[in-house]
């Protein structure tokens, strides 16, 4: 039990006596069940990320189809989608812009130091369910296997956001359809296509229940917020952008035509 262990260590330090000794009056230590609960194996993909962390949906090979659906919040019905403004920061990756903006993204007042050399880029982050049991050549479901899935985050530039927004036909919504993702020929970005509507997880009650249960830890949107870009304070941002005063900036790094 981690809490009990921490308390035992603290007591041992305070008393300057071994935490497991008779003098400290502590317990005999963890039970065998507690010890066995710490067992781990190599190759377990659940251990590749910290608890509560989302992987990004990616397509790393040409002519390979990935199939997914954008999720909505089960109570509000709104798309699980976040938007932010970012700069490329040397040795840090993408970090959030410091300029204050209105709901449409227009800078309020004077732009922050990070915007004075290069305008911030818009980044969207959506919560999606990726269907794993599909034919990679077509994106169609494999009929001889039950549907397997994984909850992921989909990063989008403004271009990708526009492409997704324009996919639905009449009386369709981006948030209730299956979408394919493939690699673009000339860029690192993704090309999207309409697969089917309504979304697969909305067509099967058991699948819908499983998907929504798996998505629960991410419904507050904190992980989507984190995935948009790092929250660096002014000193960190200036140091890594090569800024010496609040009036100028160094190289802002590469642009972002589209995101994986």
Image (cartoon, rainbow, N blue to C red):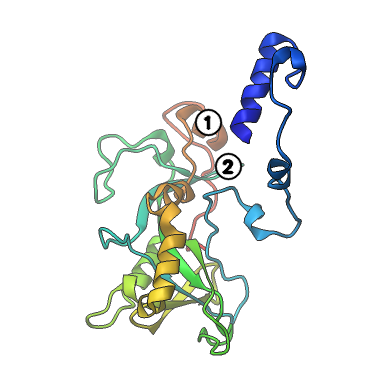
Residue drawn where x is 69% and y is 25% of the image: 27
User: Residue 69: x and y, percent?
Assistant: 41, 72
Residue 156 is at least partly visible in this image = no
Examine the rendered structure and indicate whether residue 65 appears above or below residue 243.
below
- Label 1, on which residue? 236
Q: Up-down: is 228 above or below 16?
A: below
The residue nearer to you, when weighing 132 against 94, is 132
Q: Residue at (56%, 35%) from the top-left corner?
A: 240
Neighbour tally class for label 2: few under 14, some 14-19, many 20 plus, Cα within 10 Å = some
Dot 1 crowding, Cα within 10 Å, few <14, some 14–19, many 20+: few
Left/right of residue 213 with respect to residue 56 in the rendered view: left
Q: Specify the label residue 26 is tagged with.
A: none
What secondary structure is found at the residue carrying circle 2?
A: loop
Q: Are marks 1 and 2 in contact (CB under 8 Å)?
A: yes
Quadrant housing residue 4: top right
**Quarter holding the N terminus?**
top right
Badge 1 marks a residue whose secondary structure is helix
Tell me where residue 40 appears, x and y as whole percent: 73, 51
* Closer to us: 76 or 10: 10
Pick the front one: 118 or 103: 103
Labels 1 and 2: the sequence-earlier one: 2
Disc 1 from disc 2: Cα separation? 10 Å
Residue 92's label in the rendered image is 2
Q: Is residue 241 left or right of residue 5?
A: left
Q: Is residue 52 visible?
A: yes
Residue beneath the point at 73% across and 10% down: 16
């Amino acid at each position: 039990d981690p809490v009990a262990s921490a308390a035992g260590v603290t007591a041992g330090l305070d008393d300057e006596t071994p935490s497991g000794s008779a003098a400290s009056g502590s317990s005999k230590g963890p039970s065998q069940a507690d010890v066995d609960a710490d067992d781990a194996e190599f190759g377990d993909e659940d251990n590749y990320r910290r608890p509560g962390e989302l992987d990004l949906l990616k397509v790393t090979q040409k002519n390979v189809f990935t199939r997914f659906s954008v999720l909505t919040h089960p109570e509000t019905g709104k798309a699980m989608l976040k938007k932010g403004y970012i700069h490329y920061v040397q040795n840090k990756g993408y970090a959030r812009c410091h300029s204050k903006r209105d709901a449409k993204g227009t800078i309020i007042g004077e732009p922050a130091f990070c915007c004075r050399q290069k305008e911030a880029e818009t980044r969207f982050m959506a919560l999606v369910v990726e269907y794993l049991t599909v034919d990679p050549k077509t994106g169609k479901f494999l009929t001889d296997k039950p549907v397997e899935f994984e909850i992921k985050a989909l990063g989008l530039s403004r271009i990708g956001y526009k492409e997704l927004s324009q996919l639905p036909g009449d009386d369709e919504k981006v948030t209730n359809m299956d979408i394919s993702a493939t690699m673009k020929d000339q860029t690192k970005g993704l090309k999207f296509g309409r697969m089917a509507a309504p979304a697969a997880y909305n067509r099967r009650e058991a699948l819908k229940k499983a998907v929504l249960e798996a998505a629960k830890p991410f419904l507050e949107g904190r992980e989507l917020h984190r995935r948009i870009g790092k929250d660096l304070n002014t000193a960190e941002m200036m140091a890594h952008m090569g800024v010496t005063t609040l009036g100028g900036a160094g190289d802002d790094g590469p642009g972002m035509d589209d995101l994986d």
